[in-house]
Protein backbone atom coordinates (compact mmCIF):
# COMPACT_ATOMS: atom_id res chain seq x y z
CA UNK A 1 0.00 0.00 0.00
CA UNK A 2 1.15 3.52 -0.71
CA UNK A 3 2.02 5.55 2.31
CA UNK A 4 1.44 9.25 2.79
CA UNK A 5 2.56 11.08 -0.34
CA UNK A 6 3.94 14.61 -0.24
CA UNK A 7 5.00 16.89 -3.04
CA UNK A 8 7.27 18.50 -3.84
CA UNK A 9 10.05 16.78 -1.89
CA UNK A 10 12.26 19.86 -2.13
CA UNK A 11 11.35 23.48 -2.77
CA UNK A 12 13.64 26.46 -3.11
CA UNK A 13 11.98 29.82 -3.50
CA UNK A 14 12.62 33.49 -2.98
CA UNK A 15 11.23 35.60 -0.20
CA UNK A 16 7.79 36.94 -1.02
CA UNK A 17 6.79 34.08 -3.31
CA UNK A 18 3.80 31.85 -2.71
CA UNK A 19 4.56 28.26 -1.74
CA UNK A 20 2.07 25.39 -1.91
CA UNK A 21 2.78 22.04 -0.31
CA UNK A 22 0.64 19.03 -1.14
CA UNK A 23 -0.32 15.88 0.69
CA UNK A 24 -2.21 12.72 -0.15
CA UNK A 25 -3.09 10.75 3.00
CA UNK A 26 -3.35 7.00 3.24
CA UNK A 27 -6.61 5.81 1.73
CA UNK A 28 -9.25 5.26 4.41
CA UNK A 29 -7.63 7.50 6.99
CA UNK A 30 -9.89 10.23 8.33
CA UNK A 31 -7.43 12.48 10.18
CA UNK A 32 -4.68 14.56 8.63
CA UNK A 33 -1.94 16.55 10.34
CA UNK A 34 0.57 19.17 9.15
CA UNK A 35 3.82 19.53 11.12
CA UNK A 36 6.89 21.71 10.77
CA UNK A 37 10.33 20.58 11.92
CA UNK A 38 13.36 22.80 12.53
CA UNK A 39 16.52 22.37 14.53
CA UNK A 40 15.58 25.28 16.79
CA UNK A 41 11.96 24.42 17.51
CA UNK A 42 11.79 20.69 16.89
CA UNK A 43 8.52 19.19 15.67
CA UNK A 44 5.54 21.59 15.76
CA UNK A 45 1.93 20.70 14.99
CA UNK A 46 0.50 23.37 12.70
CA UNK A 47 -3.06 22.18 12.01
CA UNK A 48 -5.11 19.01 11.91
CA UNK A 49 -8.26 17.90 10.17
CA UNK A 50 -10.80 15.22 10.93
CA UNK A 51 -13.20 14.13 8.18
CA UNK A 52 -11.88 17.05 6.08
CA UNK A 53 -12.84 19.62 8.73
CA UNK A 54 -10.13 21.69 10.46
CA UNK A 55 -10.26 20.85 14.17
CA UNK A 56 -7.41 22.93 15.58
CA UNK A 57 -5.29 25.49 13.72
CA UNK A 58 -3.79 27.11 16.81
CA UNK A 59 -0.32 26.01 15.73
CA UNK A 60 -0.42 27.97 12.48
CA UNK A 61 2.25 30.64 13.03
CA UNK A 62 0.48 33.56 11.37
CA UNK A 63 -1.98 34.59 8.71
CA UNK A 64 0.55 33.94 5.97
CA UNK A 65 -0.12 30.23 6.49
CA UNK A 66 -3.32 28.55 5.35
CA UNK A 67 -4.39 24.93 4.91
CA UNK A 68 -7.25 23.25 3.12
CA UNK A 69 -8.60 19.77 2.76
CA UNK A 70 -11.16 19.82 -0.07
CA UNK A 71 -11.66 16.05 0.02
CA UNK A 72 -10.52 12.95 1.88
CA UNK A 73 -7.57 12.31 -0.42
CA UNK A 74 -5.91 15.71 -0.71
CA UNK A 75 -4.68 18.58 1.41
CA UNK A 76 -2.60 21.70 0.81
CA UNK A 77 -0.55 23.96 3.03
CA UNK A 78 0.06 27.38 1.54
CA UNK A 79 2.47 30.09 2.61
CA UNK A 80 1.91 33.53 1.10
CA UNK A 81 4.15 35.47 1.16
CA UNK A 82 7.03 33.23 2.18
CA UNK A 83 9.87 34.45 4.42
CA UNK A 84 13.33 33.01 5.14
CA UNK A 85 12.24 31.99 8.66
CA UNK A 86 9.71 29.61 7.06
CA UNK A 87 12.59 27.41 5.91
CA UNK A 88 11.99 23.99 7.48
CA UNK A 89 10.89 20.45 6.74
CA UNK A 90 7.11 20.20 6.53
CA UNK A 91 5.53 16.83 7.26
CA UNK A 92 2.06 15.58 6.56
CA UNK A 93 0.73 12.66 8.61
CA UNK A 94 -2.53 10.74 8.60
CA UNK A 95 -4.36 8.33 10.88
CA UNK A 96 -7.69 6.65 11.30
CA UNK A 97 -9.70 7.24 14.43
CA UNK A 98 -12.65 8.75 16.19
CA UNK A 99 -12.75 11.33 18.96
CA UNK A 100 -11.71 9.08 21.86
CA UNK A 101 -9.44 6.67 20.04
CA UNK A 102 -5.67 6.74 20.34
CA UNK A 103 -4.11 6.03 17.02
CA UNK A 104 -0.75 5.68 15.31
CA UNK A 105 0.14 8.48 12.92
CA UNK A 106 1.73 7.68 9.56
CA UNK A 107 4.13 10.31 8.30
CA UNK A 108 5.06 11.27 4.77
CA UNK A 109 8.68 11.81 3.71
CA UNK A 110 8.45 15.57 4.16
CA UNK A 111 8.97 18.63 1.98
CA UNK A 112 12.24 20.48 2.53
CA UNK A 113 11.54 24.16 2.02
CA UNK A 114 14.27 26.76 1.64
CA UNK A 115 13.25 30.39 1.32
CA UNK A 116 16.07 32.63 0.17
CA UNK B 1 -1.92 20.08 30.06
CA UNK B 2 -0.61 16.83 28.63
CA UNK B 3 3.14 16.71 28.04
CA UNK B 4 6.08 14.44 27.34
CA UNK B 5 9.62 14.91 28.62
CA UNK B 6 12.49 12.90 27.24
CA UNK B 7 16.20 12.98 27.89
CA UNK B 8 18.24 15.45 25.93
CA UNK B 9 20.68 14.20 23.38
CA UNK B 10 22.73 13.53 21.61
CA UNK B 11 23.42 10.09 22.99
CA UNK B 12 26.60 8.55 21.59
CA UNK B 13 27.24 4.82 22.02
CA UNK B 14 29.55 2.22 20.61
CA UNK B 15 28.10 -0.67 18.65
CA UNK B 16 26.70 -3.46 20.88
CA UNK B 17 26.27 -1.11 23.87
CA UNK B 18 23.07 -1.03 25.94
CA UNK B 19 20.67 1.81 25.20
CA UNK B 20 18.23 3.58 27.49
CA UNK B 21 16.35 6.71 26.51
CA UNK B 22 14.22 8.07 29.34
CA UNK B 23 10.70 9.33 28.81
CA UNK B 24 8.19 10.58 31.38
CA UNK B 25 4.74 11.96 30.77
CA UNK B 26 1.96 14.02 32.30
CA UNK B 27 -1.56 13.24 31.18
CA UNK B 28 -5.14 13.29 32.28
CA UNK B 29 -7.01 10.11 31.62
CA UNK B 30 -5.43 6.95 30.27
CA UNK B 31 -3.14 7.66 27.34
CA UNK B 32 -1.58 5.34 24.85
CA UNK B 33 2.19 5.73 24.68
CA UNK B 34 4.37 5.53 21.60
CA UNK B 35 7.97 5.60 20.46
CA UNK B 36 8.55 6.91 16.96
CA UNK B 37 11.88 6.85 15.12
CA UNK B 38 13.12 9.24 12.44
CA UNK B 39 16.00 8.09 10.25
CA UNK B 40 18.04 10.73 8.42
CA UNK B 41 16.10 12.37 5.61
CA UNK B 42 12.85 10.56 6.41
CA UNK B 43 9.58 11.13 8.21
CA UNK B 44 8.75 9.69 11.61
CA UNK B 45 7.60 6.09 11.79
CA UNK B 46 6.13 4.08 14.62
CA UNK B 47 8.67 1.96 16.48
CA UNK B 48 6.43 0.55 19.23
CA UNK B 49 3.39 1.36 21.33
CA UNK B 50 1.62 0.39 24.54
CA UNK B 51 -2.01 1.09 25.27
CA UNK B 52 -2.39 0.39 29.00
CA UNK B 53 -0.43 0.18 32.22
CA UNK B 54 2.14 -2.64 32.46
CA UNK B 55 1.96 -3.30 28.71
CA UNK B 56 5.31 -3.82 27.03
CA UNK B 57 5.78 -2.68 23.46
CA UNK B 58 8.57 -4.25 21.43
CA UNK B 59 9.94 -4.13 17.92
CA UNK B 60 13.34 -4.63 16.21
CA UNK B 61 14.97 -5.44 19.57
CA UNK B 62 13.64 -2.28 21.22
CA UNK B 63 11.37 -2.48 24.26
CA UNK B 64 9.44 -0.07 26.46
CA UNK B 65 7.12 -0.77 29.40
CA UNK B 66 4.18 1.47 30.31
CA UNK B 67 4.72 2.33 33.99
CA UNK B 68 1.73 4.17 35.40
CA UNK B 69 3.16 4.44 38.91
CA UNK B 70 6.22 6.35 37.67
CA UNK B 71 4.50 7.85 34.59
CA UNK B 72 7.35 6.57 32.46
CA UNK B 73 7.90 4.78 29.15
CA UNK B 74 11.66 4.36 28.84
CA UNK B 75 13.08 2.93 25.60
CA UNK B 76 15.70 0.17 25.86
CA UNK B 77 17.74 -2.00 23.54
CA UNK B 78 20.29 -4.55 24.65
CA UNK B 79 22.77 -4.18 21.80
CA UNK B 80 22.64 -1.20 19.43
CA UNK B 81 23.85 -1.22 15.85
CA UNK B 82 25.15 1.56 13.64
CA UNK B 83 21.88 1.35 11.72
CA UNK B 84 19.99 2.41 14.88
CA UNK B 85 21.42 5.92 14.56
CA UNK B 86 18.36 8.13 14.35
CA UNK B 87 16.18 10.52 16.34
CA UNK B 88 13.75 8.89 18.76
CA UNK B 89 10.50 10.57 19.82
CA UNK B 90 8.37 9.59 22.80
CA UNK B 91 4.69 10.46 22.36
CA UNK B 92 1.30 10.11 24.01
CA UNK B 93 -2.28 10.19 22.86
CA UNK B 94 -5.23 10.66 25.20
CA UNK B 95 -7.76 10.73 22.39
CA UNK B 96 -9.18 13.83 20.72
CA UNK B 97 -7.26 13.27 17.49
CA UNK B 98 -3.97 14.80 18.65
CA UNK B 99 -0.66 13.15 19.60
CA UNK B 100 1.74 14.97 21.92
CA UNK B 101 5.39 14.46 20.93
CA UNK B 102 8.52 14.90 23.02
CA UNK B 103 11.44 16.97 21.78
CA UNK B 104 13.29 13.96 20.37
CA UNK B 105 16.59 12.35 21.35
CA UNK B 106 19.31 11.94 18.74
CA UNK B 107 21.28 8.69 18.94
CA UNK B 108 24.68 8.19 17.31
CA UNK B 109 26.12 4.67 17.25
CA UNK B 110 29.82 4.32 16.42
CA UNK B 111 31.27 1.25 14.75
Image: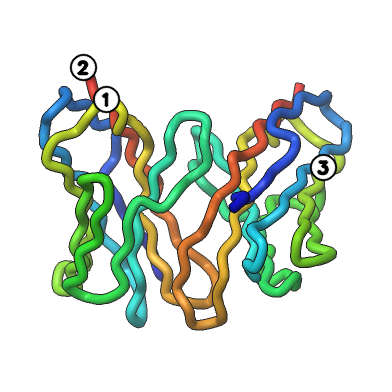
| Image location (x, y in percent) of residue A79 | 80, 43
Crowdedness near tag 2: few (<14), some (14–19) or many (≥20) residues, C-alpha within 10 Å: few
Residue placed under numbered mark 3 in the picture: A20
The residue sitting at 79% across, 62% down in the picture is A69
Q: Assign the N terminus of chain B to one quadrant of the image.
A: bottom left
Q: Is residue A96 left or right of residue A11?
A: left
The residue sitting at 69% across, 33% down in the picture is A9
Report whether mark 1 lies on the same chain as mark 3: no
Which residue, as the protein is rendered here, is positioned at the far front?
Answer: A1
Q: CA distance from mark 3 to mark 2?
A: 41 Å
Secondary structure beneath dot 2 equals loop
Q: Is residue A57 visible in the rendered structure shown here?
A: yes
Crowdedness near tag 1: few (<14), some (14–19) or many (≥20) residues, C-alpha within 10 Å: some
Q: CA distance from mark 2 to mark 1?
A: 6 Å
Residue B82 — which label? 1
Label whose residue precedes the other's in the sequence (2 or 1): 1
| Image location (x, y in percent) of residue A60 | 69, 55
Above or below, comparing residue A101 to residue B7 in the picture: below
**What subunit carries mark 2?**
B
Secondary structure beneath dot 3 equals strand
Residue placed under numbered mark 2 in the picture: B111
**What subunit carries mark 1?**
B
| Image location (x, y in percent) of residue A71 | 81, 66
Residues at marks 2 and 1 touching, judged by CB atoms closer than 8 Å? yes
Q: Is residue B100 left or right of residue A9?
A: left
Q: Is residue B23 left or right of residue A23?
A: left
Q: Is residue A24 left or right of residue B22?
A: right
The residue sitting at 22% across, 29% down in the picture is B81
Q: CA distance from mark 1 to mark 3?
A: 37 Å
**What subunit carries mark 3?**
A
Amino acid sequence: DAGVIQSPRHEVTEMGQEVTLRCKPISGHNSLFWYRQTMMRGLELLIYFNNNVPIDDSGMPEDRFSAKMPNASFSTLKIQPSEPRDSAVYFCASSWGYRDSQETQYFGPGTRLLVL
Amino acid sequence: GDSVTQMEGPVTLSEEAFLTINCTYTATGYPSLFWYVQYPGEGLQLLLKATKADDKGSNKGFEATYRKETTSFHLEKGSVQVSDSAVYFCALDTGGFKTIFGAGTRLFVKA
